[in-house]
Amino acid sequence: MGFKHDYASCSSLIYKLAKSRNFEAVETLLGYLEDRNIRCQETLFNALFQHYGKAHLIEKAVELFHKMPSFNCVRTVQSLNSILNALVDDDKFVDAKEIFDKSAEMGFRPNSFGKIDGACFVLEEMQKREMSFDLEAWGALVRDACGGDDDAGELLTQLILVNSD
């Protein structure tokens, strides 16, 4: 008579294994959960994105983000933000932008606040890393925050440039 592991015992082991960077064992346990159709909580994945990111295994984090539904786990804005943060922390700005741009296709509904907040986040991260930010990059960021409306983006860029003199 064997012991059957449930979600609580598996997730506890996964947290500890990820913290110790034993990702091979993490993958094994994730396979166990997936094979047995055991419902997983989003917090487990959010923690794993962070651990994968710190270990510079960001591709594994992105792969896991896309596989979340196969673990009976609904992706929410929290998991979207977690994967975006992991990507940005690993300097994968283009990948973060790509996932953010596809978020509507994945069922997320970014509102205007989310678009502007995302643009501000990218700007702040670039400033923290002392990355150059030219007029072309600024224009692209503003247009994207304005929902791709070139006229609105151009107007906002011009207003900011006029007021910065």
Image: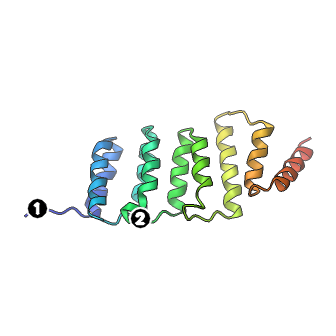
Disc 2 residue type (three-letter): Cys
Give the percent coordinates (x, y) of residue 161.
88, 44
* Residue ID for mark 2: 73
Disc 1 residue type (three-letter): Gly
SS class, disc 2: loop
* Badge 2: residue crowd in 10 Å (few <14, some 14–19, many ≥20): some
Give the percent coordinates (x, y) of residue 119.
69, 50
Above/below status of 97 relative to 90: below
* Badge 1: residue crowd in 10 Å (few <14, some 14–19, many ≥20): few
Above/below status of 36 relative to 53: below
* Residue ID for mark 1: 2
- In-image side of 128 versus 43 (left or right): right
Give the percent coordinates (x, y) of residue 91.
57, 38
Quarter of the N terminus within the rendering = bottom left
Residue drawn at x 30%, y 41% as measured from the top left:
22
The reply to whether residue 46 is visible in this rendering is: no
